[in-house]
Structures are given as C-alpha cells and as structure tokens.
Image (cartoon, rainbow, N blue to C red):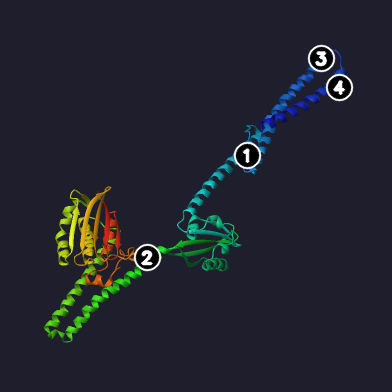
Amino acid sequence: MKASNSRLFLTYSIIVVAVIFSMGRIIIPLLSGSERTIAILTFLGGLIIFFVIIYNIFEKYIKPVRSASLVAEQLVKGNYKARTYVSQYGEAGKLSNTVNVLARSLQEMTIQEKIQGNQLETVIDNMESGLMLIDERGFVHLVNRKFSAIFGRKVSDYIGFLYYDVLEQENIHKAVQEAFLYEEKVKNSFTISMEIEKRYIEVVGAPIFNEKKALKGAVLVFHDITGLKRLEQTRKDFVANVSHELKTPVTSIRGFAETLLDGAMEEKELRKQFITIILTESERLQALVHDLLELSKLEQDELKLNLKVIGVSSLFNTILPIVKHQAEQKNISFSATIDNTIEMYVDPERLKQVFMNLLNNAINYTPSSGEVRLNIHLVDGFVKITVSDTGIGIPEEAKNRIFERFYRVDKARSRNTGGTGLGLAIVKHIVEAHHGTIHVESEVNKGTRFCVLLPSQ
C-alpha cells in the first residue's frame, strides 16, 4: 500500500512540474532583464507552493480515502484484520476511523462466531444422544459422533446423502415423513441387532421452520434406551421371581394348615409332620423376607457402612465354629489359610455376610467327602479372599448370571438347602460398596472358586 501511495504522489508531482515548466518555457523568453529573473523566481516559488499544497492534499485527503478504499476491499474479501491509515483531519479522518471501527467489529464478530461455532460443535459431538439434521429435500447435513457410534458407520458415510439411502430402518423413515407431513414432533422406536446383543433406540423427529414459518427440514434425535429396557425387564423378572418365591411357602403353609383343620389334627404323627413342614416353610419365608430387606438396604444410595480397622483373623474366628459345624455335618473337609498380620478398613458385619454366604454356598453345593478351602492373603495392596470347593460347579453359560437376584444354577437343590437365590447378589453389593471386585472360576463337576479383592486400607 505504501509503494502504491508513493507512486501516486510521484505522478502528481511530475504533472505539476511539467505544467509549470511548460508555462515557464512559454513566458520567460518573452521577458528580458530583471523581469525574467522575477518570473523565474515566481515560477520556482509557485512550484514550491504547489508541492506543499499537493503534499497536504495528498496526506490529508487522497491518501486516507484511498487507504480506506483498499481496506474496504479487504473487508469484502473477508480479511477482517486489515486496517486503514488514520487521519486526524476532517471528513477523511472520520472515514478512516469509521472503517477501522467497522473492521474491528467484524473481526470481533468473526471471533465470537468461531468460538460459538466451536462450542456448538463440541456440544453436539459430545451429546449422549445421536443427532441428524436433514433439509427439506431429505439430504443429510449433519450427524454427530454418538449417531455414528449407534449405527456403526463413519460421519462421511451420511453427509450429503438422502436419509432413506443411508438408513434402512423403516421406523426412521416413518418418523421423518410424519414430521414433514404433520409439521409437529413425532416419536418412534426401533431395534438394532448387534453381534452380541440387541440395542433399543428411540427416535424423536421435529420439523425446522425459518423466520417465515416455511418448512426447511427436520432434526432427528436418537436416544439409546437399551439400559432402560434392561432395567424394565429386570424389574419385571424381580416381581415375577418374588411372587413365585413367596407363593411356594405360602401355598405349603396354607395347604397343610387347611389339612390340619379338616381333621388331620387328631392324628398325632400326621399333626407333628405337618406342623414341622409349616415351621420349615415359615423359616424359609422369613429368610426370604430378611434377604430381600438386606438387598434393599444395600442397593440404596444412602447406605452407610460402619467402617473400622480390624484384623482379618479375629473377624474370621467369630464365624469359624459355624462353618466347621456345617462342614462336619456333611462330612466335608474344611481348611483355612489366613495371613494373621492383615488388617482391613471395612464394615465387620457386612464382611461377615460375605464370608458366610460364600462358605455356605461352597458347603451346600459340595457332596460328602469333598473339600472346601479358604485363603486370605495380600496381593499388590489388596486383600485377596478365595473360597474354593470341589462341588458340582457352574456351567459356562450361567457364570454371567449367578450374581442376579433369584438366579439359581440348580433350582431344586437350592431350595432343598434353604437358599433364597439372593446370597450372591448380596455379596456383590457388599463387595462393591467396599470398592472391591468379585469374580468366579468354575468347571462342572470339578468345583468352583470365588475370588474377592478388597482394598487393604
């Protein structure tokens, strides 16, 4: 810009010099003596005056206006960093200042738009729901990462294509068509079959209007409701299981009570047998209600653990007589290897539940002359509790379900041993409440091994 201004000033200067020189060549030869000297000095003075005037005009008016014009051209091209020469004189100065203010405003607006665009892009890409934007012709203009994750394809596989060419689900087509047809929000759902499981997706479609209320497209939001579906199914299963588990003992108690009232009360042996059955079933019902209440407490977010530092050996010694007695009754060999130096920051009563549930299961599912072993030792800052047996084992397909409420590998045997089907669910909740983990290793007819890892401090 400076080189251009210099060339312009030089051009004007050459023109003025040429004009005055031409005038001098015409007038000076017509004069003589002192008149000629005066004329020469006059032309020289005029030339100087013209130079001064031209310089001032150029600096105060032409240069600012030309600079403002060039900056305006840069602004039109999108270069909002351009600035003009600032003149302090008259209207040209106002023009320069105004152009600079305009340039700064445009630059700030561009920066703000860029920031807002980045923020909006970040929000859209990090949404927990899939998003698709289509125009009035059905072409896809925008999809986010969650959408791509749901359908398992790249973003570039959707942008610029017709929605019905890249999405095969008929329920999505229906949602788009209804959003365009009725011009209101619509909702639908569909499933996507994955390699391992089925995913449940809810799609909400809404039309997009411009300021003149003309339909310009639609936005589709995809919610992955697989977790909600699982939760709903779990609730249904839980209600069904509770109803079934309660129905069996209640039916037995009522049936034998009615039989006694119908005349069996008079027969001593029969009366004793029926009352014994009623007692057994009522104890089973009581155990079931107790475990349900325990599980309910453990599942509450506000569960408070009574944590304290205790020695593992002293904790286990309180339950050792019970475990040994149960093992001796079934002629099962029981052994325990415990590092007596281990101390833990735990809730003692809850940890006793873990020991009792795991050891009871091991004894109950191990045939006579079998073995049950307990091992407690430190591993990389964690207390590892291992309960292993030589029992009936767990089938491979059941390993992922044994911690579910009421799930039983051998339903008949579980009921015969007095199990409620809630023991391992309780164990899992207690272990996780202590920020620990539990997993199982098992082989059918060879035995089972439960491993619990708990923080030592």
> Residue lying furthest right in this view?
30
Per the model, the C-alpha gap separating discs 3 and 2 is 112 Å
Residue 399 location in percent, x, y?
32, 63
Going by the numbered disc 1, the residue's amino acid type is: Val
> Residue lying furthest left in this view?
268
Mark toward the viewer: 3 or 1 = 1
> Would you identify the image quadrant in which residue 96 lies?
top right
Residue linked to disc 3: 37
- Visible in this render: residue 346? no
Secondary structure, mark 3, is helix
Report the disc number at residue 231.
2
Residue linked to disc 1: 99
Mark toward the viewer: 4 or 2 = 2
First reached walking from the N terminus: tag 4 or tag 1 = 4
Determine whether 212 is above or below 20 in the image. Answer: below
- 135 lies left or right of 426: right
Residue 167 location in percent, x, y?
54, 63
Going by the numbered disc 4, the residue's amino acid type is: Ile
Per the model, the C-alpha gap separating discs 3 and 4 is 15 Å
Secondary structure, mark 4, is helix
Mark toward the viewer: 1 or 2 = 2
Residue linked to disc 4: 26
